[in-house]
Image (cartoon, rainbow, N blue to C red):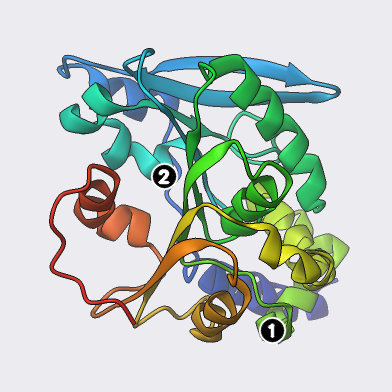
Amino acid sequence: MLTLRKPILAIVYTMAFASCHFPVRVLSDEQIAKHYANRPTKPKLKYINYKNFHVYHAVVGDSTKPLLLIIHGAPGAWYSSMKLLDDSDMQKNFRMVSVDRVGFGKSNYGVSEPSIQAHVHYIEKIVKEYNKDGKIFLMGSSYGAPIAASFAMQHPNLVQELYLISPVIDPSKEKLFWFSYVGKLGFVTMTIPEYLNVAGDEKFAHRRQLRRLKPHWGEITCKTYVFMGEKDNLASLGNLDFARKRLINAKDPEFYLLPNTSHTIIYQRPDLLISFLLKRNSPLAAH
């Protein structure tokens, strides 16, 4: 047993190092409470049930305004979009809902659900709960982007604007690194956080899931924005080219490659996303 100790530790440390490349920011209830302690507006934190899923989500903003639904990547949580939720102008112009996707945060934590369609189903339930008969604004980041896109494909008359942030959408660009396989070993999965196991399960199934979506990209007809960071080391920049080729029926799609920006656009550049959502003048040139 002692002879295995060093190799096992090496693998665990490698997995820990690899996990550092993910945009992971885990906040405790106490940290969230402290963040909102002196703020005039704080989101309501709720559950909504769909079959065996108990989907935790944050709600904030004007209930008479259009719904903006935000879907995080893998891993992530509702507070990944906290900078959008906390903006006072956004609160005046939108009713914002940010979800903990199933398997992450407080939504069936640790339960892997690789099926994009399964995520779309509970998103449909949330939209039905919070949308007031109008069209919605939909934002998906990283692995949340194909979920948002799939919803827009299936509900073309319901989505007004679609925002794909650092999207992981091209099946040919999905790669598994050696430490992804190491992470599937039983003794390794017991030593790393469950959200990384869930993210790993999604990663293994993602190429197959994206292949199923590939024939349907022409079904997106709403106004669509695609943003990628020039220094993204998690998603291939080829995803931007894929979107450009596949969004053939989207209304005036716009594509942006952001300089000096990595995968975490929603965290690094909330000001930019807010400018687009509120239709302020943007200094960006489309690519």
What is the x, y in percent for residue 83?
27, 41
Please state the total of marks drawn on the protein image: 2
Q: Quadrant of the N terminus?
A: bottom right
Image position, residue 25 (x, y; %): 42, 49
**Residue at position x 59%, y 81% in the image:** 245
**Which residue is depicted at the point 35% across and 54% down?**
266
Write down the residue under mark 1: 177
- Percent coordinates x, y for residue 267 in the rendering: 32, 54
Q: Which of marks 1 and 2 precedes in the sequence?
A: 2
SS assignment at label 1 = loop
**Mark 2 → mark 1, Cα distance in angstroms:** 25 Å
Mark 2 — residue? Answer: 80
Residue 168 in sight here = yes
Question: Which of the numbered marks, if any, corresponds to residue 209?
Answer: none
Residue type pointed to by label 1: Phe
Residue 170 position (above or below residue 123): below
Q: Residues within 10 Å of mark 1 (few under 14, many from 20)?
A: few
Q: Residue at x 13, y 56 (%)?
A: 281
Report whether residue 227 is seen. no
